[in-house]
Image (cartoon, grey):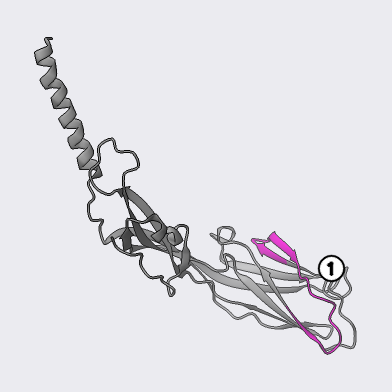
Amino acid sequence: MSSESRIPFAIFISVLLAGCVAGENAATSPPSTYPVQIKARSLEFSAAPQPQQHAGVVLNLAIRDNLPQLYYRYEVTSRINGSYFMMPNPPKLYTVYRIPFYQNIPAAPVVKFTLTNNSQQVIETGHSICAFDLDGQTILSKPVNIPDLLPGHTAVARIEGPTFDQLQGHASLTVWIYHLGDGTDGTPYKWVLPYQLTEQTRSAQAELVGESPREEAVADYRGRIEPAANSPASPDHP
């Protein structure tokens, strides 16, 4: 190929590359929303647990439904702000989107025990255990962790139970309290708690919060997660 034929070919390649870079880097307005799919899990108990009593000790168990709460996380992206070919550190435009998602807080159901000592004896609690059963198998056990209960006194204990993944596919949760009394063979307390665990996937929209050419203007959004009721102001626009 002659030198005359090579020059036009080189010019053509340069123009083509420049056109591609300009097309990729040209700043365009981002969409104000885009669709997302979010998962919502609900744990609902169908009956209120009844109080139990042994040897003058009354034990109440309370457990709340665990329902999904709407939260936002923030996604920060950047792109070149304009058309720059082979320019080191070209200016950028930073975009912030607010993305909804559901979160269960706490992440597992919590049982609340209220113990009242109506006897004339000190009720020892140092060996007391709370256990959770599914299909007759203990899947989780934890110490009750309350001081010995004096006559005429009341104590409260809160214990986090099994996770959603452990409860999946079951219809009832059995809760036990062992060794409340003498530390070795106290009469156990037992509750059977029917529940319904549901999981749904819902359609939602991620929303554009704003744009800025200054990275420091979006710095507070990186990694931010917050309840839907507390939404921050948008970053400044260019």
Image-based side of 3 in relation to 71, left or right:
left
Task: Write down the quadrant of residue 132 in the picture.
Answer: bottom right
Residue 216 horizontal/vertical position (percent): 41, 58
Residue 27 horizontal/vertical position (percent): 24, 50
Magenta stretch: residue 112 in it?
no
Residue 124 horizontal/vertical position (percent): 87, 76
The C terminus appears in which quarter of the rendering? bottom left
Residue that numbered label 1 is attached to = 127
Magenta stretch: residue 148 in it?
yes
Residue at 60%, 81% (x, y): give it: 48
Q: Is residue 49 visible?
A: yes
Q: Is residue 116 visible?
A: no
Image-based side of 220 in relation to 122, left or right:
left
Task: Write down the quadrant of residue 149 in the picture.
Answer: bottom right
Residue 119, above or below 32: below
Q: Hey, what amino acid is under mark 1?
A: His
Q: Return the residue nearer the eye: 188 or 64.
A: 64
Q: Write the start and end of the magenta stretch as one range.
A: 131-156
The N terminus appears in which quarter of the rendering? top left
Which residue ends up furthest to the top in the rendered image? Answer: 1
Q: Return the residue nearer the eye: 12 or 160.
A: 12
Residue at 25%, 37% (x, y): give it: 85
Residue 214, above or below 82: below
Which residue ends up furthest to the front in the rendered image? Answer: 88
Residue at 81%, 87% (x, y): give it: 153
